[in-house]
Image (cartoon, helix red, strand yellow):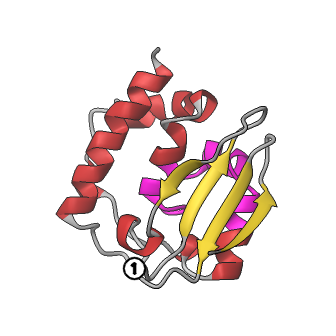
Amino acid sequence: MDTFTFAGTNGWMWRLHFGQPLTSGYKIEYRKPRQGWWNPLFEDMDKESTGHYALSGFFDLVEHLSACPALLRGATDWQTDPIFLRKVAADYPPLAKTLVGRLTSDDYNPNEIYCYYDEPISHDQADTIRVLDEQVLERALA
């Protein structure tokens, strides 16, 4: 299996797996500082994410991840993949804490998140985001 490993911000490392015959996207893993193991983020990014342009091509993906997780602290759902944002926040308390206000707002509704094509995300993606929102809030309020 072919991999590409590179540094992100805040001491994070990212690893992309490609050339997998049964997947169309990349497998993405991350490692936090002082951590010896890799945490899976996506098994098949194309199937598990919303298809945001920041994660669409190899070079765009590497550029985006190399600025993460710091880039995500002020990112909106328009600037990065909303599923990616929440998956990282569920394991990164500083990011989770920045999302609390948005996730607990009275007018927040995952069904009203739009992808970069200006179309609403699918119901399955909204359900995934709901589950991740709960995990993010648990992490932030722990």
Q: Secondary structure at mark 1?
A: loop
Q: Quadrant of residue 121?
A: bottom left
In terms of depth relative to the viewer, which is nearer, 1 or 57?
Answer: 1
Spot the residue most to the front.
Answer: 1
Is residue 68 visible in the rendered image? The answer is yes
Q: In the image, what residue occupies the spot 42% across and 37% down?
A: 102
Quadrant containing the N terminus is bottom right
Question: Where 109 sits versus 111, above or below?
Answer: above
User: Residue 137, image x and y in percent?
Assistant: 40, 27
**5 relative position to 60: left or right:** right
Q: Residue at x 59, y 35 (%)?
A: 95
User: Is residue 59 shown left or right of residue 124?
Assistant: right
- In reply to whether residue 81 is colored magenta, the answer given is yes
Q: Percent x, y for residue 89?
A: 52, 39
Residue 113 vs 132, above or below: the answer is below
Give the total of numbered labels: 1
The residue where tag 1 is placed is 117
Residue at image point 79% right, 48% down:
9
In the displayed structure image, the side of residue 141 where residue 106 appears, left or right:
left
Q: Nearer the viewer, residue 68 or 16?
A: 16
Q: Position of residue 85 (x, y in %)?
A: 51, 50
Q: Which residues are magenta?
A: 63-85
Relative to 115, is 10 on the left or the right? right
Q: Amino acid at mark 1?
A: Tyr
Q: Is residue 74 magenta?
A: yes
Residue 108 in sight in this render: no
Residue at horizontal 53%, vertical 67%?
A: 27
